[in-house]
Structure formats: structure tokens, C-alpha cells
Image: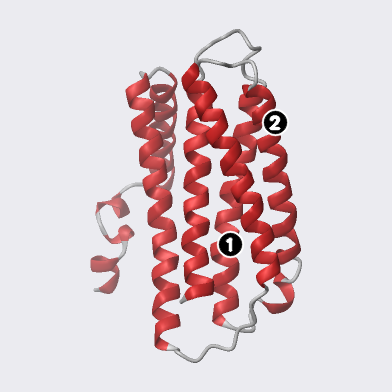
């Protein structure tokens, strides 16, 4: 009874063979890629917004779990390393300043310095990832000691993964154009994504250090 009511396989999906199911999924995925490659700018912005919305829902899920466990356990013995937090925050702030300059240059149409600023932003993201690597070097030793440690690594790990994606995105955009004066919407999107990553870090800061 539970299988028929609560599992996806208990629906009409059980009448499909495994091969047919995966072929249909592969066809839908291929058609989605083809539609994305031939879509207009408005549709691309819609896809970009849906991607960010899905990321917000992912973080909201783990944030809800953290709040549920944190507020139900008012006594938490946790040592805060303020110096490491300030270092990471300073790196993200530098990146945000660079992003603001890049977006301003894009809006003005001055693309001569955009590549150089994008490369600097890529270096800043690498510095951030190196600082986070120091945190994750202790992952195997302490991840199972306490629930707060586990959630710390989940939240900061998701955030670092987004910074890694942003760094790859920035690196690609740095060499996508050859300074031909094209209007660079992709640089604007990269800036919006970086500010989204910074907002996630602010939310993580409030959760881990203030609540």
C-alpha cells in the first residue's frame, strides 16, 4: 500500500520498461538542449532565473534543516574562528567590487578593460577556493562528530561549488570575445551570479555565526 501511494514507481511509471523510461528522459534532455541553443534572449533569461530559483530552493532546504536542529538545541558548544571567516568575507567583498566595476563598464560599453577585470575576478575566486580547501582538509576527521559540523560542511560546500562554477564561467567569458566591442550580456549574467553567491554567503554567515 505504501509503495502504491508514496513512491514514484507506484504510479503509471511502473508500466514502462526501464529502457523506455530512460530513452524518453534522454530524448527530453536532448530536445531541451536543442531548444536552449536556438532560443531567444528572453527565454535564456527565463532559464537563468529558473536556475537561480532552483538553487535558492536547495539552500532553503538545508537552511530549514539547520534552523530546525539549531533552535531545538539551544545549548551549542561551538568554537568560532573569526579570522578565517573575515578572510573569506574579504575575498568575496573584493570579488563583488570587481563585479560592480565590470557591470558598470559593460553598461557604458567600454569593453577594453573587461577581459582584464574578468581575469582578476577569476584569480579572486581561486583564492577563495584555496581558503575553503583549508576548511575541507579536516572534513574526514570531524564531519561525523556533531550535526552542526555536518551542516557547516554541507552549506559551505554548496557555496564553494557555486564559486567553482562561477570561476569556470568567468574563465570562459574572459576568452569568449577578442575585444571587438560586442555587447557582453554574458559578463552581466556572470556578475549577477556572483552577487547571488555573495548573498548566499551572507545568509550562511547569519546562520552559523549569529543564530
Q: Position of 34 compared to 122: left or right? A: left
In depth, the one of 102 and 171 nearer the eye is 102
Mark 2 sits on what residue?
119
Image quarter for residue 69?
bottom left
Q: Which one is in front, 196 or 8?
A: 196
Q: Position of residue 202 (x, y in %)?
A: 49, 59
Q: Is residue 143 above or below residue 192?
A: below
Residue at the limit of the structure toward the bottom, as seen here: 75
Residue 103, position as x, y percentages in the image: 51, 29
Q: Residue at x 73, y 48 (%)?
A: 127
- Return the residue nearer the eye: 166 or 40: 166
Q: Which residue is mark 1?
A: 156
For marks 1 and 2, the one nearer the N-term is 2
Q: Is residue 127 left or right of residue 158?
A: right
Label 1: few (<14), some or many (≥20) within 10 Å?
some
Tag 2, which secondary structure? helix
- Distance in Å between CA atoms under marks 1 and 2: 24 Å
Kindly identify which numbered label has been placed on residue 141: none
Residue 152: quadrant of the picture:
bottom right
Query: If the image is split into quadrants, where does the N terminus sit?
Result: bottom left
Local crowd at mark 2 within 10 Å, few (<14), some, or many (≥20)?
Answer: some
Q: Nearer the viewer, mark 1 or mark 2?
A: 2
* Residue at image point 42% right, 73% down: 65
Left or right of 133 in this view: 21: left
**Is label 1 in a helix, a strand or a loop?**
helix
Amino acid at each position: 500500500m505504501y509503495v502504491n501511494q508514496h513512491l514514484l514507481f507506484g504510479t503509471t511509471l511502473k508500466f514502462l520498461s526501464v529502457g523506455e523510461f530512460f530513452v524518453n528522459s534522454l530524448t527530453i534532455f536532448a530536445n531541451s538542449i536543442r531548444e536552449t541553443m536556438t532560443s531567444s534572449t528572453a527565454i535564456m533569461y527565463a532559464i537563468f532565473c529558473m536556475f537561480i530559483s532552483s538553487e535558492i530552493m536547495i539552500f532553503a532546504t538545508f537552511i530549514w534543516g539547520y534552523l530546525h536542529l539549531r533552535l531545538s538545541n539551544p545549548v551549542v558548544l561551538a568554537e568560532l574562528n573569526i579570522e578565517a571567516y573575515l578572510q573569506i568575507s574579504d575575498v568575496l567583498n573584493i570579488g563583488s567590487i570587481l563585479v560592480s566595476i565590470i557591470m558598470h563598464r559593460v553598461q557604458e560599453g567600454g569593453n577594453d578593460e573587461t577581459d582584464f577585470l574578468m581575469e582578476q575576478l577569476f584569480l579572486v575566486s581561486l583564492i577563495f577556493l584555496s581558503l575553503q580547501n583549508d576548511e575541507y582538509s579536516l572534513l574526514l576527521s570531524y564531519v561525523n562528530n556533531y550535526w552542526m559540523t555536518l551542516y557547516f560542511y554541507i552549506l559551505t560546500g554548496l557555496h564553494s561549488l557555486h564559486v567553482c562554477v562561477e570561476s569556470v564561467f568567468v574563465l570562459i567569458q574572459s576568452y569568449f570575445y577578442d575585444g571587438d566591442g560586442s555587447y557582453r550580456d554574458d559578463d552581466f549574467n556572470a556578475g549577477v551570479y556572483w552577487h547571488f553567491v555573495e548573498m548566499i554567503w551572507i545568509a550562511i554567515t547569519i546562520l552559523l555565526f549569529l543564530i
